[in-house]
């Protein structure tokens, strides 16, 4: 429990820092309030309109007061409207968040679903033909950036075969599951391919080490079957690096998602954030960044708890001896 | 390349044309300058290039991003279709279902998904819009304009029942027809016209256009009529002002409601052929058929969905994948490809084309561009033809000035150097540097589109070879590109503009009254302040003598050439490619019996209400 509380306290600290930086970031933009007001209102404003914009954004308040005011709006969901398209920012984020979430989840799921069995079998059959094919192909996949994978997949499966639509259009899983998966299959595959390669190689290496452990030898001596040996005994202690990597990848995935969403024109959080930056939609950027940060620290918190479950030494604070 | 551009005023256009596919509806009207079509499937005819195109340096510019190509053209009359069958063009009429010579009737119904080059939305109230081509393509389905360019080179009333001037063109009476209502059932009447024009007077773009307007009031004797008074004689007021953004009419009820609730601004309400249905930034703009549209039998389609796909090649791939039914593009590579394809018919629009060019800020304090020699050195150093060939797949016609071949004032040859002369460029720069010691630097702004960037890199290389110590490139996102131009925060800017057929349509772009200081929004982006140009524009505005107007426009052309106010690129051609079951855009007849120009009188746009789909 102490471990959990300590991790939670760290999470709260990160959240405070991130939200504070996001809330007061407007103060540090080049050009100051004049530029912000010009962007917000299109220029040519009266002094009254100028003041109204400054007050709306809390730029006339002391920095802490601005922060608490901003946090109040954030927590209450009163995020205002986008400056150029007059959309509710909270609605925009609510629309974008599931898309990025599905994309990351599907990408991770597909990568892990293929990586784990392939890695386990490769480790078990080290240096076999299967292992050599698996590791060599993983090498190739690791060298494929998503901006190469995406157009190739699109050309093959959208333009030539017309199996999946391009651009991808999001459909709710519950309203139209077929269209939903069609929209995500190529973007998720684009994300999954390099992830799969990394996970497979990581898990394979750990599994090889684990399979050489004394307890595995003992299990074998006891006549434990192959499947139980691999998945019941060897896999769990080999997962530590994989779980760490998967968690760390959440952060890099957010970056990758930006590219993939832009390529397939999926309007997820990545595209929303980038487009908002380009359009100088600062409030949208603020809320989007904070949402992404919360997701990131939240997932890492869960991963920390998972460590403790996977390896009791973490709970006991003896992980490093 | 892309470009796009603000075209607030209205625009252009000319001739009728259209294109059709083998079974087009409509009969041909005056084919004027239209170029027609040929079947891409069976007769891969290359529509000619003379009017087409260009890539232009400028390829980039405001608007969407079509990567590669050329300049676009206005949707004016010249349209060519690479579609099967004969070259019959057709003119849809307001009579019940138009039929082709073969007796094929337009079939109502269906949904069209169109890929557009950018989501350049803004608040959708007409007076607040800062629009590029895609924005106009979308919003013209929701709003009708009071007037519309016709195929005879003039204007006709459209939403307005009549638009009549006094003897010296200083007062115009605009009368609304009876029984037309907005989509929210608000009646369209004189008060609605007054409300819209009064708001337009306050708009950043529309206000500049309506500068001469001194009074807008309801006729006390006729609630259906608005009276507009001007401080100058303005013979082409309906064409320049009322057929474009300033003449687009929105529901006063909705505009008032949007004053209180900002989120309503993105849900426009007009009298147009389609009714707003849904808008998701960067994803789609959907609309449904206005079943009570006053201009029956339009529209044919039940639904239209516009999907912004900024990258030109991605837009092409979206058509190929079947996700969209129709696209527009100025990308030379795409146009060249669709000219040859057997799968997708394409209508090309090249009349009264915009010109792709490099816009120079010519009055910025301390800028080397104040010196004519530096400006002309940029022109001499540029090899536009190589850009057309290398980036625009050869689709393009090099520009000798601001006016394309079908525009009044076009000259095949001017004093402008269309052939690269690096030695002359180096001589001019050396001369300037001898008088102005110190580093000679310049900043070139472009969009984030790859083709535009490539174009800029060519320019950077040439200009540094000419003697500039440094040419820096600034990539600006599409959303801020136009605003940057409006504010004048640039030195050199890739752009596309100036489609149309009357010089008066360029007034706001070039007259010094539209050129306030940097930091203030201005339509005269380059802040040209030339008394000779002002005088010519003013004389043209007041004149209704076609011969004199032609002379004036040619003088303007020469003036631009000798002063090197801009670096001309290529004339723009737009390609409208679509699936085989789609019957592409056609010309239709206006309420006064004249043909409308092909397209919507604005480069790159057309009226989807004339499109129908095989069911």
Image (cartoon, coloured by chain):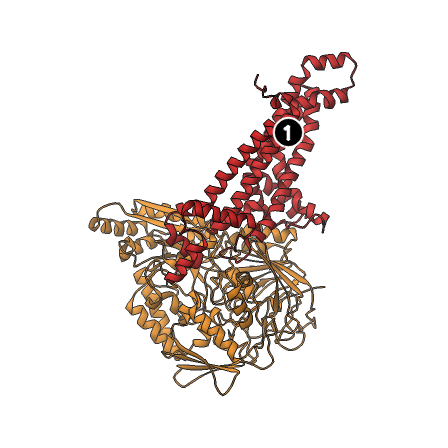
In this view, which residue lies farthest toward the bottom?
B221
Badge 1 marks a residue whose secondary structure is helix
Q: Colour of chain B?
A: orange
Which percent across, then down, holds residue B154? 47, 76
Q: Is residue B277 visible?
A: yes
Q: What letter labels the chain drawn in red? A: A
Q: Please state if B323 lies on the left or on the right of B498 as rendered.
A: right
Instruction: Examine the image and state in which quarter residue A184 appears.
Output: top right
In this view, which residue lies farthest toward the left?
B435
Going 52% across and 43% down the picture, which residue do you hit? A290
Which percent across, then down, holds residue B235? 41, 79
Q: Is residue B251 visible?
A: no
**Circle 1 chain:** A
The N terminus of chain A sits in image quarter? top right
Q: Please state if A159 lies on the left or on the right of B125 as rendered.
A: right
Instruction: Examine the image and state in which quarter residue B328 appears.
Output: bottom right
In the image, residue A181 sits, relative to residue B289, either above or below, namely above
The C terminus of chain A sits in image quarter? top right
Residue carrying label 1: A306
Q: Nearer the viewer, residue A12 or B465?
A: A12
Q: Please state if A34 lies on the left or on the right of B296 as rendered.
A: left
């Amino acid at each position: 429990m102490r471990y959990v509380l300590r991790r939670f306290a760290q999470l709260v600290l990160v959240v405070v820092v991130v939200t504070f930086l996001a809330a007061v970031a407007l103060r540090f933009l080049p050009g100051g309030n004049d530029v912000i007001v010009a962007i917000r209102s299109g220029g040519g404003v009266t002094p009254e309109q100028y003041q109204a914009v400054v007050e709306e954004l809390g730029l006339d308040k002391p920095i802490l007061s601005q922060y608490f005011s901003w946090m109040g709006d954030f927590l209450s969901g009163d995020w205002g409207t986008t400056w150029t398209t007059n959309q509710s920012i909270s609605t925009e984020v609510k629309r974008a968040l599931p898309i990025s979430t599905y994309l990351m989840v599907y990408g991770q799921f597909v990568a892990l679903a293929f990586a784990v069995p392939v890695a386990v079998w490769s480790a078990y059959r080290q240096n076999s033909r299967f292992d050599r094919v698996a590791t060599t192909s993983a090498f190739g996949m690791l060298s494929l950036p998503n901006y190469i994978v995406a157009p190739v997949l699109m050309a093959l499966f959208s333009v030539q075969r017309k199996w999946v639509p391009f651009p991808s259009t999001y459909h709710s899983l519950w309203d139209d599951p077929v269209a939903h998966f069609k929209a995500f299959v190529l973007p998720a595959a684009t994300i999954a391919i390099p992830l799969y390669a990394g996970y497979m190689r990581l898990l394979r290496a750990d599994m090889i080490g684990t399979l050489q452990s004394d307890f595995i030898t003992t299990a074998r001596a006891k006549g434990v079957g192959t499947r139980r040996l691999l998945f019941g005994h060897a896999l769990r202690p080999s997962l530590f690096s994989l779980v760490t990597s998967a968690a760390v990848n959440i952060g890099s995935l957010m970056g990758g998602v930006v590219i993939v969403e832009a390529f397939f024109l999926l309007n997820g959080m990545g595209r929303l954030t980038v487009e908002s930056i380009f359009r100088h939609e600062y409030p949208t950027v603020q809320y989007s960044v904070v949402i992404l940060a919360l997701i990131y620290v939240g997932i890492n918190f869960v991963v920390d708890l998972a460590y403790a479950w996977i390896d009791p030494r973490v709970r006991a604070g003896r992980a490093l001896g | 390349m892309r470009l796009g551009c603000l075209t607030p005023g209205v625009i252009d256009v000319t001739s009728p044309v259209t294109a059709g596919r083998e079974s087009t509806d409509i009969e041909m009207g005056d084919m004027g300058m239209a170029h027609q079509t040929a079947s891409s499937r069976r007769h891969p005819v290359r529509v000619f290039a003379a009017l087409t195109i260009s890539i232009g340096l400028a390829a980039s510019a405001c608007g969407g991003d079509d990567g590669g190509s050329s300049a676009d053209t206005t949707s004016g009359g010249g349209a060519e279709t690479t579609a099967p069958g004969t070259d019959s063009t057709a003119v849809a009429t307001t009579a019940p279902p138009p039929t082709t010579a073969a007796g094929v009737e337009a079939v109502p119904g269906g949904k069209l998904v169109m890929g557009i080059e950018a989501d350049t939305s803004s608040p959708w109230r007409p007076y607040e819009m800062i629009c590029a081509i895609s924005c106009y393509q979308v919003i013209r389905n929701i709003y009708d304009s009071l007037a519309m360019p016709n195929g005879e080179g003039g204007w006709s009333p459209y939403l307005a029942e009549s638009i009549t001037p006094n003897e010296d063109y200083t007062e115009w009476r605009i009368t609304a027809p009876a029984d037309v209502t907005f989509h929210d059932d608000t009646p369209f009447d004189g008060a609605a016209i007054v409300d819209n024009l009064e708001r337009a007077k306050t708009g950043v773009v529309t206000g500049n256009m309506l500068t001469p307007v001194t009074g807008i009031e309801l006729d006390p004797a006729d609630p259906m009529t608005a009276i507009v008074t001007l401080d100058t004689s303005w013979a082409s007021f309906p064409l320049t002002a009322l057929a474009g953004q300033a003449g687009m009419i929105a529901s006063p009820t909705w505009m008032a409601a949007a004053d209180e609730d900002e989120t309503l601004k993105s849900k426009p309400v007009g009298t147009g052929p389609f009714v707003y249905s849904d808008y998701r930034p960067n994803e789609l703009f959907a609309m449904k058929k206005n079943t009570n549209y006053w201009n029956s039998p339009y529209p044919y389609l039940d639904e239209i969905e516009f999907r912004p796909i900024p990258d030109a090649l991605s837009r092409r791939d979206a058509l190929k994948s079947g996700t969209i039914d129709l696209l527009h593009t100025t990308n030379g590579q795409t146009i060249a490809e669709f000219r040859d394809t057997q799968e997708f018919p394409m209508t090309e629009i090249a009349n009264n084309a915009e010109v792709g060019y490099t816009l120079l800020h010519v009055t910025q304090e301390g800028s080397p561009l104040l010196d004519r020699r530096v400006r002309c050195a940029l022109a001499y150093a540029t090899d536009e033809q190589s850009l057309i060939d290398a980036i625009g797949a050869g689709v393009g016609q090099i520009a000798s000035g601001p006016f394309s071949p079908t525009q009044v004032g076009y000259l095949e040859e001017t004093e402008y150097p269309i052939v690269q002369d690096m030695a002359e460029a180096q001589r001019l720069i050396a001369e300037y540097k001898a008088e102005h010691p110190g580093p000679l630097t310049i900043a070139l702004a472009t969009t984030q589109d790859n083709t535009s960037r490539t174009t800029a890199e060519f320019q950077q290389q040439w200009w540094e070879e000419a003697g500039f110590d440094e040419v820096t490139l600034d990539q600006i996102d599409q959303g801020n590109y136009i605003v940057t131009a409006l504010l004048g925060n640039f030195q050199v800017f890739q752009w596309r503009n100036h489609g149309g057929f009357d010089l008066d349509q360029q007034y706001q772009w070039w007259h010094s009254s539209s050129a306030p200081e940097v930091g203030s929004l201005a339509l005269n982006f380059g802040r040209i302040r030339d008394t000779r140009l002002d005088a010519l524009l003013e004389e043209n505005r007041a004149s209704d003598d076609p011969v004199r107007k032609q002379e004036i426009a040619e003088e303007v052309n020469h003036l631009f050439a000798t002063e090197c106010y801009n670096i001309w690129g290529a004339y723009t051609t737009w390609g409208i490619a679509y699936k085989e079951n789609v019957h592409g855009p056609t010309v239709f007849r206006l309420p006064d019996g004249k043909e409308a120009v092909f397209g919507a009188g604005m480069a790159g746009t057309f009226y989807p209400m004339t499109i129908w789909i095989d069911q």
